[in-house]
Structures are given as C-alpha cells and as structure tokens.
Image: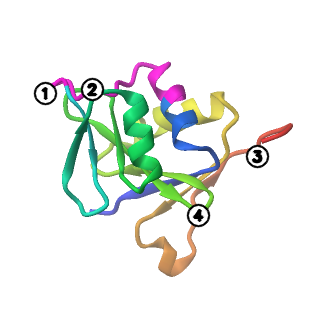
Amino acid sequence: MTILIAYVNAKADELASAFVSHGYSWKNPITGEISLFSVDGGRLVVPTPEAAIREHEQGALLQLWQTGTLDLPIGGATCGACLFFDGWRAKEVAGCLSILESQKISYRVCTDDSRLHGDVYHSAVPRSGPA
C-alpha cells in the first residue's frame, strides 16, 4: 500500500500545537501514554509533550492520535517536518491537511515512492508574512 507523506514547512512543536488544538491528542487512547519511536526504531515513552518535542529534536518520530487506532507520525525533514499518512482514508488526509491550511502552513504531499519520480500531488499556498 502506498503511503502519503506531507512535507511541511513548520517545526514539529508548531504542528503538534495546531493538531492538538483541533482535537488530536499526545496520549495513546488505549495505553494513556505519550510515546514516540526512537532513532533506533524502539518505542519510547515520555512523561510530557515537552519531553516528546525534546526527543524529536534528537531524531525521534513523534506520534499524535486522532482516534483509538488512527495515529499521525511526525518526523523531521530538511524543510521542517514530515507527516506520514499510513492507512489513512482520503477524507481523513483531507481533514488533516485542512488544519495546515487553516494555520497558513505550507506543505506538499507525495507518495512514499514519489521521491523516485518527483510526483507532487498538492502544494498549499505559501505563508504570507514572516516565517
């Protein structure tokens, strides 16, 4: 299955704040834990969102939750951050991207194999004003 990836022109803490203000959660609704994936791929549990951001700055993959089974991994990228839509339906992806647009955060969405082909499916209007 193809994974969509949004390359986002924003820092992870800015993205997390935007998503949490729109109903996403730091805590896994099943375990109640704030967890990430460490650089070596292991699961890492942290006590606070601030600790999660610090771990992300060291290379860990953040994980926010929309529902009991739908998670939003946030990774680092040279342009800011990456959102990974693995197993998401089109309507769910569109809802997530609308949050970025409402915050005037620019992004581009590609498939996980588009880095081989250069395919870009959408580019949001770049931010106006200082970044």
Q: Position of residue 95 (x, y in %)?
A: 47, 32
Gap in Å between the C-alphas at discs 4 and 3? Answer: 15 Å
Compared to 78, does 29 lie above or below? above
Q: Secondary structure at mark 2?
A: loop
Region of the chain picked out in magenta, as a range: 17-32
Q: Secondary structure at mark 3?
A: loop
Q: Amino acid at mark 4?
A: Val
Q: Residues within 10 Å of mark 3 (few under 14, many from 20)?
A: few
Sequence-wise first label, 4 or 2: 2
Name the side, left or right, on which 61 lies relative to 19.
left
Gap in Å between the C-alphas at discs 4 and 2? Answer: 32 Å
Q: Amino acid at mark 1?
A: Thr
Gap in Å between the C-alphas at discs 3 and 2? Answer: 31 Å
Q: Secondary structure at mark 4?
A: loop
Gap in Å between the C-alphas at discs 2 and 1? Answer: 8 Å
Check disc 4 and report the residue beneath it. Answer: 120
Name the side, left or right, on which 80 lies relative to 37.
right
Which residue sits at x=20%, y=24%? Answer: 29
Q: Amino acid at mark 2?
A: Lys
Q: Amino acid at mark 3?
A: Pro
Q: Position of residue 18 (x, y in %)?
A: 54, 27
Q: Secondary structure at mark 1?
A: loop
Check disc 2 and report the residue beneath it. Answer: 27
Residues at badges 3 and 2 in contact (C-beta under 8 Å)?
no
Task: Give the quarter of the image for residue 104.
Answer: top right
Disc number placed over residue 31 in the picture, else none: 1
Q: Position of residue 114 (x, y in %)?
A: 48, 72
Residue situated in front as seen by the camera: 99 or 18: 18
Check disc 3 and report the residue beneath it. Answer: 126
Sequence-wise first label, 3 or 1: 1
